[in-house]
Image (cartoon, rainbow, N blue to C red):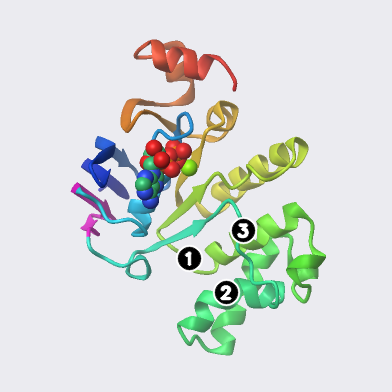
Amino acid sequence: MASVEFADVRKSFGTHPVIKGVDIKIEDGEFVILVGPSGCGKSTLLRMLAGLENISAGEIKIGGQVVNGLAPKERDIAMVFQNYALYPHMTVADNMAFSLTLKRASKAEIEKRVKPAAEILGLTPLLDRFPRQLSGGQRQRVAMGRAIVRDPQVFLFDEPLSNLDAKLRVAMRAEIKELHQRLKTTTVYVTHDQIEAMTMADKIVVMHDGLVEQIGAPLELYDQPANLFVASFIGSPA
Ligand code: ADP
Ligand code: MG
């Protein structure tokens, strides 16, 4: 059974169609990257999967269950945004625990989840700090920590590294991949960066103007692009 499935998914804003019939199947544990030029509909697709945007037609499934109409908190997902959206007045530990606090988890339960997540991310010495006392990379790790403590079926990332400088971006790519190798959580990751897609993905979905142009492993797209768009997009770094 696929972990995530889009079946003929469509979305219009008013009369303007932005997703024009998308089919994608993502297997359990896969690291899938949606890549394509700015404005092609990547964030809209991810937001529909998260339940932050309703869908105009088609079906989205998570773990075999149709989620059309389910609120974000009713979906077994956790999203990491580009602007980490940490709470400035809360410590790292409290930021990480926030979703559990909302669910009225016990103190013991919170500790049981936050500690190992902090350990994995190298945040243990920073748990009492506030976001303003952290570097960009550390803030990014806290944002990931918030997702990990929820232990979701699927992680969603929308351009998580685009605010970081080039050097840190390269380091964080490796960290996110390591994290995936440890946790094996199904991941859907959006970027407009071809290099990020080619170096991080198990499977790449190339999007263009609201449609999927090709789905395949990085080398497959590189060796056998389905059309000129894929060839030029994968072939030429932005
Ligand atoms: P990407 O993430 O690939 O850059 P988006 O999914 O953000 O693209 O946007 C796809 C298209 O949908 C763009 O033309 C964008 O202007 C439009 N769009 C996105 N969100 C809205 C919205 N809330 N209202 C109207 N148009 C939108
Ligand atoms: Mg976007």
Residue 237, position in %: x, y? 59, 20
Inter-mark Cα distance, 1 to 2: 9 Å
Kind of residue at disc 3: Tyr
Q: Can the viewer see residue 197 in this picture? A: yes
In this picture, residue 157 sits left or right of residue 59: right
Q: Which residue is mark 2?
A: 113
Asked if the residue at tag 3 contacts the one at tag 1, i.e. Cβ–Cβ closer than 8 Å, the answer is no
Upstream in sequence: badge 1 or badge 3: 3
In the image, residue 105 lies at what x, y percent? 50, 85
Cα separation, mark 1 vs mark 3, equals: 18 Å
Q: Label 1: which residue?
A: 151
Q: Secondary structure at mark 3?
A: loop
* Mark 3–mark 2 distance (CA, rounded to whole Å): 20 Å
Question: Would you call the spot at circle 1 few (<14 residues within 10 Å), some (14-19), or many (20 or more)?
Answer: some
The answer to which quarter of the image holds residue 24 is: top left
Determine if residue 44 is in view.
Answer: no
Circle 1 sits in a helix, a strand or a loop, which is it? loop
Dot 2 alpha-carbon crowd within 10 angstroms: few under 14, some 14 to 19, many 20 or more: some
Q: Earlier in the sequence, mark 1 or mark 2?
A: 2
Read off the magenta span. Answer: 57-68
> Which residue type carries mark 2?
Arg
For label 3, the residue is: 84
